[in-house]
Structure formats: C-alpha cells, structure tokens
Image (tube, helix red, strand yellow):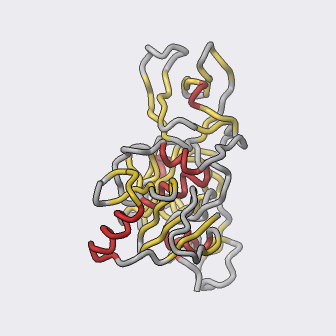
C-alpha cells in the first residue's frame, strides 16, 4: 500500500502518473510552483495539523487549488500536503541557497536599510547581481557570505546540524525558527547533497546500513527510537531536537538513551551509518 504522505492523491484528484489509486479520481498533471514565503506549513488536510514545513524558493508540483488551499507535492522529498495558495508563485530560476543558520533579505544594497524577510538555512534564491558584499535578488539584497551556489554542498552533516544548536523544538518544523528531530536530520543531510525523507520512520527505512556492534558510534551515524532520531557527533555525544529540552542540543549518548527509555519511549531500535 502506498504511503499517503508520499502519494499525490486526495479524495478528488490524483497525479496523472499514478496507476494504483481509485480510477474515479480526476487525473491531473502537476503545475510547477515555488514557495514565496520564508516558511510555510505543509498541512495534512486543508484545515489539518502541520506535518512538515517548506522554505522560501523550494520547488513543488501543485495538483489542486481549491478554496484558497493548494494540494501539492514537494520535490525535495516527495512529501504531499496542503498549503495556503497565496504562499506559492510560478516557478522561477534559483541560483543559490542560504548556508547560514538564517539571514536577512534587505530592501536596498545597504545592511542598514529595512529588512524585508528573514530566510532560514536551506532557502533557495535567485541572485541576479552583486553590490559590494551583497547579492542582489529580485526581492532584495542578501549578504553574499550567507549564500552558496546551487550544487555547492557542505562536507559534514554534523556541522550543518550544529548550526541549529539552540533552535526551539517545533513539531514538524524545518527552519531556524523551529525544528524537530527528523527535520534536523533532513536539513543536515540535504546540506551535504544526500537525499533524505522527511519523517524519522521514513529515514530509518531509507538511509544507510545497520550498525550491529553495540557502542560503535561514529560521527554522522543516526540513532533511532520509536518516533525519534538523533545524529552522532562523536563516540560519546549526539545532537538532536527533542521535546525534553524543547531545543536542539548536544548531550551524552548514554544519558540520552537512559533518559528516553526512562520516559517510556523505549530503547534505540536502529543504528544506521551512511
């Protein structure tokens, strides 16, 4: 059975390429669009809970626009859901991605000018020119030091994750304003050019190989509990977004394992190495 989180079909429409869903649904071809807000919630239903979030410039395919809500599929990981239609715009070129934890988009080529938006790590922008230390985009100016060209990746997912230390925990969050455990892992892996699903159970199934030797922790390993994931920093330390600290933190691996088990969430159920 197809995972509904990854299946672009609802009670009215289905993506034209789908052959294993109800034939009564209208088959539609997705319209390429782009996120035009710094952060937008991807909802389970038009009036439902947040499942994940999308960032400025991310590409999506829209399959339905109804009552001000768009049913779509994100290209970065295939996740489907609903967003406010006003948060989308026609697809445009992107040339760079935000590689700082967050940055401001300024009105003018002057860092003392009004800031229009704050963009999170991983946001996508189109640089059309340069002005001193600033990159010009169609909507304003961004410090060049906060950007990397599309295709230029980081070399260490742990360093990417550490950029989020202190970020508030937010269920379904994917930004510097708020992030959850699987959002942190996905963000860190996408930063090194490694494809990564959006939720921890998907990540456990799709990523890496099993490590069977107990205590054999290496930098970048992933540890999974039921409904939770953390990344190994070194042989004694991990980093994760969690609801106990309500933030992204580093803590001793052994202490985290004991605490999580003691809270009733059980033991580590998988240890993966990329």
Vertically, is 6 above or below 187?
A: below
Indicate the quadrant where residue 46 lies: bottom left
Q: Image quadrant for the C terminus?
A: bottom right
Q: Position of residue 178 (x, y in %)?
A: 38, 49
Question: Does residue 252 lie above or below 137 as drawn?
Answer: below
Please report the residue visible at 54 percent of the width from the left and 46 percent of the height from the top. 160
Residue 82 is situated, as x and y percent measured from the top left of the image, at: 47, 61
Which residue is at 35% across, 53% downward?
169
Residue in the foreground of this view, choosing between 155 and 52: 155
Quarter location, residue 140: top right
Answer left or right for 178 relative to 63: left
Number of numbered tags placed on the structure image:
0
Establish if 117 lies above or below 268.
Answer: above
Does any portion of residue 256 appear in the rendered image? Answer: yes
Where in the figure is residue 118, as x and y percent of width and height? Answer: 44, 34
What is the x, y in percent for residue 157?
Answer: 58, 51
Q: Which quadrant is home to the N terminus? A: bottom right
State the residue at coordinates (51%, 47%). 55
Q: Which quadrant would residue 154 be assigned to in this image?
A: top right
Residue lying at 34% horizontally and 48% vertically, measured from the top left: 168
Q: Is residue 126 left or right of residue 106?
A: right
79, above or below 34, in the image: below
Q: Is residue 68 visible?
A: no
């Amino acid at each position: 059975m197809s995972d509904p989180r990854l299946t672009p079909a609802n009670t009215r429409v289905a993506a034209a390429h789908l052959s294993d869903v109800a034939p009564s649904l209208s088959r539609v071809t997705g319209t390429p669009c782009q996120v035009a807000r710094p952060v937008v919630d991807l909802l389970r239903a038009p009036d439902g809970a947040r499942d994940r979030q999308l960032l400025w410039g991310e590409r999506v395919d829209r399959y339905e626009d109804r009552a001000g809500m768009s049913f779509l599929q994100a290209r970065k990981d295939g996740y489907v859901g609903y967003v406010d239609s006003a948060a989308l715009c026609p697809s445009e070129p992107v040339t760079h991605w935000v590689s700082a934890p967050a940055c401001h988009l300024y009105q003018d080529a002057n860092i003392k000018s009004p800031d229009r938006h704050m963009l999170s790590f991983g946001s996508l922008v189109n640089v059309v020119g340069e002005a001193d230390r600033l990159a010009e985009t169609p909507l304003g100016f961004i410090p060049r030091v906060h950007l990397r060209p599309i295709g230029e990746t980081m070399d260490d997912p742990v360093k990417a994750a550490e950029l989020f230390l202190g970020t508030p925990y937010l269920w379904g969050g994917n930004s510097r304003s708020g992030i959850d455990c699987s959002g942190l892992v996905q963000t860190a892996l996408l930063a090194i050019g490694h494809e990564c699903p959006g939720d921890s159970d998907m990540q456990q199934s799709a990523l890496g190989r099993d490590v069977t030797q107990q205590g054999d922790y290496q930098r970048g390993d992933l540890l999974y509990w039921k409904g939770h994931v953390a990344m190994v920093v070194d042989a004694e330390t991990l980093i994760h977004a969690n609801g106990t600290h309500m933030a992204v933190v580093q803590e001793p691996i052994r202490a985290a394992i004991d605490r999580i088990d003691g809270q009733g969430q059980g033991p580590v159920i998988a240890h993966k190495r990329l």
